[in-house]
Image (cartoon, coloured by chain):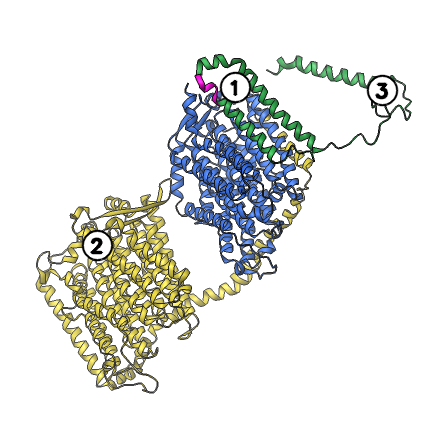
Chain colours: A blue, B green, C yellow
Amino acid sequence: MTANTEIFQLLPHLVIGVGIVLSVVIEISTKKSESILPWFTILIFVFAGAHSIINVYDYQILFGGMYAIGGVTAIFNFIFTIGAAIMVLNAVDYIKKSKMNFGEFYILVQSSVLGMMLMAGARDLFMIFIGLELMSICFYVLAGINRSRMGNTEAALKYFLLGAFATGFIVFGIALIYGTAKSTSIDQIVFAYEYFITDVLFLTGLALFVIGFLFKIAAFPFHMWVPDVYQGAATPVTGLMSTTGKAAAFSVLIIILSAVFTQNITNNFEILFAVIATLSMLYGSIVAIAQDNLKRMLAYSSIAHAGYMTIGLAAGNIESVSGIIFYLTAYAFMNLGAFGVIALIEGSNEENLDINSYSGLNSKSPILAGFMALFMFALAGIPPMAGFFGKYYVFVASIKADLTWLAIVGVFSSAISVYFYLRVVVYMYFKDSTSSIIIKNSFTGLLAVIISGLLVLVFGILPDTLFSIITSVLSY
Amino acid sequence: MIEQYLPIILVLVVAAVFAAAIVFSSRLFGPQQPSKIKIMPYESGKDPVGSTHERVSIKYYIVAMMFIIFDIEVIYLYPWGVEFRNLYNEYGFFAFWPMLVFLIVLELGFLYIYKKGALKWD
Amino acid sequence: MIELIYLTILLPLLGFVINGFFGKKIGNEKVIGLIGSSTVGISFVISLLALIETINLPVEQRTNVVELFTWMSVGSLNISFSYLVDQLSLVMALIVTGVGFLIHVYSIGYMHGDKGFYRFFAYMNLFIFAMMNLVLGDNFVVLFLGWEGVGLCSYLLIGYYYDQKFEKGTVAQAAKKAFIVNRIGDFGFLLGMFLIFETFNSLNFLEVFSQAKHLTGAESTFGFIALFLFIGATGKSAQIPLFVWLPDAMAGPTPVSALIHAATMVTAGVYMVARASIIFASAPVILAVVAVIGLLTAVFAATIGLVQTDIKKVLAYSTVSQLGYMFLAAGVGAFSAAIFHVMTHAFFKALLFLGAGSVIHSMHHQQDIMHYGGLKKYMPVTFLTFIIAAFAISGFPGLSGFFSKDEILWFSYANGNFVYWLLGALTAVLTAFYMFRLVSLTFFGEERFSHDKYHPHESPKVMTIPLIILAVLSVIGGWIGIPEVFSGEHGNVFHNWLAPIFLDAELKLAYYGAHSHTEELILMAISVSAALFSMYGAFKIYTQRREIAEKFALKFKKAYMVLLNKYYVDEFYEATVIQPIQKSSEKFLWKIADNKLIDGIVNGTAVVITSFSSVIKKMQTGVAQVYALIMMTGIAAILFWIILSL
């Protein structure tokens, strides 16, 4: 009987679910859906985000241990919904500009966010899988939403092929875990983690499961799809995939490894994650140097950032988890901001993505140049921007876990990455303009950039506001 | 641990060896005198026309996919319908509403593709 | 109002943001000036209300912490933006905002027509913001933030006329000098902070000081902390050996000299020593060093002041000398006397600078007092207020400077020794002399300027009203700190007000030798009469018989030249510190270490990484099958590792 009322605890999910259905209705019933849908989408996202963050301390397990709300889940939901809202705000004019006016865009974004929320809240392997599929399938379609462009189609196809490949491993992993642990409930698996962890089949299953999600967070060597897909997909979509998608995958990794983080169980994966983190950081930072296309550069930078966050998984303590969550929040807003600026500067047919287009930007649009510089500094991890504290918390946690060498590699890699981030700043401020790009005014796009910029600054100047919430809810 | 799976592995190995042996034995022992008519694709006794790798119009796929949607709908509806009396006794009308919601969402989806012109043949 | 104290910090910041970012667009001087000064004015009112509220609280509840937000908290390191509202910080906040407000108003007139009007007010507001952080912060980090902030603003404002010449170099060089010399001090301050955190595991004032109170022994640790902090103070407060930047800082606009280089920023060192009084009191040796350095600086700068001919230079050396006084007071354990002198000095020195600014303003930026003379009839208000300030600084009985200075002199004798007193009194005599030399040469005697070129006139009301207010304060400002010899037991209001803050330090020092009031009165009489005589002498010589001064200069030509050239300290630093560093940095660091070694390493790494990057970039073929293959390899490797590791 409880299922009756428990369903209403999932208000944000219900709102988005109903929102999807209503969006379908709006799309078919009126010609003006183009101007209604984005605002409708933003409205339900903001509501869901606000509801989640308000109820952050209201931690509950629902449906017989199938699903959880509040706590860390609420923080992740906040990242997903607010990130997606910013992205939609940014995309309104982008969609008009690049003539891909499909109502499906908004419906798919909502569905993917619902999938992410299901992933973050799930306490059961099947639930995770349903959420993952909902998110991934929407992403495959979103990547190729503009069918008239070769790049879009290519990105979608590659993403789909490799994503399906990775999903296969996840399912295989779930099968092996179920076979050994005889349960798909994460709480039960975590409860008896110690007994399974020496079982080769369980360990293999867990490894396959983790590998699937390492693919989603774009860690080396499962990153190969990232540059092509990020470059090919429409810019706002890339922004969404690289931030909220990554956060969703991390939420699952944190849940599935929660026994390691909370119960002081030996971290079998420590070396594995440490090696993957090292390779991701170095590979991402080094290859990004040779990129001239900004979207491609940010794709490699996203691999490097996945590496920094994986340091936290390797460290395997409570501090590192809160560090990862803070990092994800910071990364979500700075990366969305950076992609937002790129989307504003991009021409109607994927022009002006080259770094040369940004030369002398300061003289043409000081606001955009200023914000781009802000995001580049934040991504490079320069205080007082939020990116600095993300790295700082993760590095401190890794030193506590006796992984000082990993922190050193991280700092070294950050030093390399400063080169390509600041290259953009140098082009914007110290090079004379060579190209004659025309930046179309977009109030909503600019608003999205400003909001992300403010959030990056707020979390940089007042990191403790967010960090104390994260640490306090992690104690559940 | 692993030993108990040994019979399965044995079966797999035997099956693979047996299949390979059959395929290769016909190659090895059978006479091979190919002629033009012999290697022609079999098309119900008629002479084949055009390429065998013909592309099918994407519209067939769309119809096929829509068929799957309703297929799944029926799969869900059937056991529900069979068990409805018991469910009703236990849960009351709560057993009814979720299915209604499911159907409405599904039909809305169908309406959507219809409005988008997925069923227009030309 | 105590809990709203953060507004006093945020409002100037708001002013800075408005004027700094939109000032150019606003353009209207009145609006900019109004924004600039009203933000500081409101801050002053809030501070005043907070003071009244604090006065009404019982003594033991007068220390309040207003927490704004926690900046970061990692392990035992907890840094928060919180502000300490207590007797000491309120006094400082009132000085900063009060005097700051008057100077802002004055600047509206003084900077009239300047093309960088908005820039000036933006920097001034930023300065007030930083300075309020400095005096109100409740931990060393916020204090240091303000400390660096005021240094930055000082640099920006000294270099305000960055495109003009100043003495032998340019204004920009003077600004750079101030910044670099301050950095040396800041380095010491930082070391002190590290040592504090190492020792007490906290940087919060209340925690550190309460621990320090109980910590006995460990004198060498305290000694090093105090020494490092004091090095920081010598930089910021222009003491030997780091005082050289302050005279050059006069390159900035005169209101800047009044606000930053006389009334507020340079007293930050004194404030910091007073704030950390318990640490200094625990290291008596360093406290003695503070006293000696202060005393030497006081005498040293006063002698230089005797012969300077630039009106602002005289005042600059006078400031250095008075700051020395304050450190003398702190060094003998009379912390409240030091703060008292900070306050009175803020009144009359700001007044002197603003008066000088008024003169300079009307004399078309002529600053040489040899080209002034007889100005009193052209600018009566400026003359009157200026001479009041001169009387105050010279310690004329009844004026503010008299009370604060004599308190310091008395404590230097009572807690120190006779030599301290003697040199202190000598400084007072010298101060009286050069101040009245300045007054005489400027306002009295024959007019030594051509009327074709200069048309001296009184300044507008917006400038003279702040002068008048400051003059009133210079007269009555000392009445809240009348020494007990006149006001009876516990009659010194100011001292009683601050006493709880310095109680611990004074208990640790346990001075208070038994000295009779008669002794105090005799010493006071001697120093005051000497100063009065010196004032009269200077007035006589420089208004009627200037040949005496010239003869004197000729007779002791060598000594005169030494003084005129400021003891060749700048030249000494140039030869011993700057030149060797420049030479070695040019010959070795730049050409070999930097160009060859470091650039080689950096460029080499960059080249290697870039070429490496271009090579592995080729792994990204674009073929999805290859991607899947690489993934598969990774999966195989991981599974292999997992199975092997079991």
Q: Taking the image as drawn, is residue A275 in sight?
A: no
Of the two numbered discs 2 and 1 in the rendering, the one whose residue sits closer to the viewer: 2
Q: Residues within 10 Å of mark 3 (few under 14, many from 20)?
A: few
Comparing C193 with A472, the one in front is A472
Name above or below for residue C126 compared with residue A453: below
Comparing C553 with C322, the one in front is C322
Q: CA distance from mark 3 to mark 1?
A: 48 Å
**Left or right position of C218 against C162:** left
Whether the magenta-drawn stretch holds residue A166 is answered as: no
**Percent position of residue C166, x then y:** 40, 74
Do discs 2 and 1 belong to a common subunit? no
Q: Which mark is residue C49?
A: 2
- Secondary structure state at the residue bearing disc 2: helix
Tell me the quarter of the image containing the C terminus of chain C. Answer: top right
Of the two numbered discs 2 and 3 in the rendering, the one whose residue sits closer to the viewer: 2
- State which quadrant residue C544 falls in: bottom left
Q: Amino acid at mark 3?
A: Arg
Q: CA distance from mark 2 to mark 1?
A: 69 Å
Comparing A234 with C253, the one in front is A234
On what subunit does the disc labeled 3 rest?
Answer: B
**Percent position of residue C581, x then y:** 46, 64
Q: Which mark is residue B27?
A: 3
Which residues fall within the magenta stretch?
Answer: B92-97
**Percent position of residue C527, x then y:** 16, 70
Q: Which mark is residue C175?
A: none
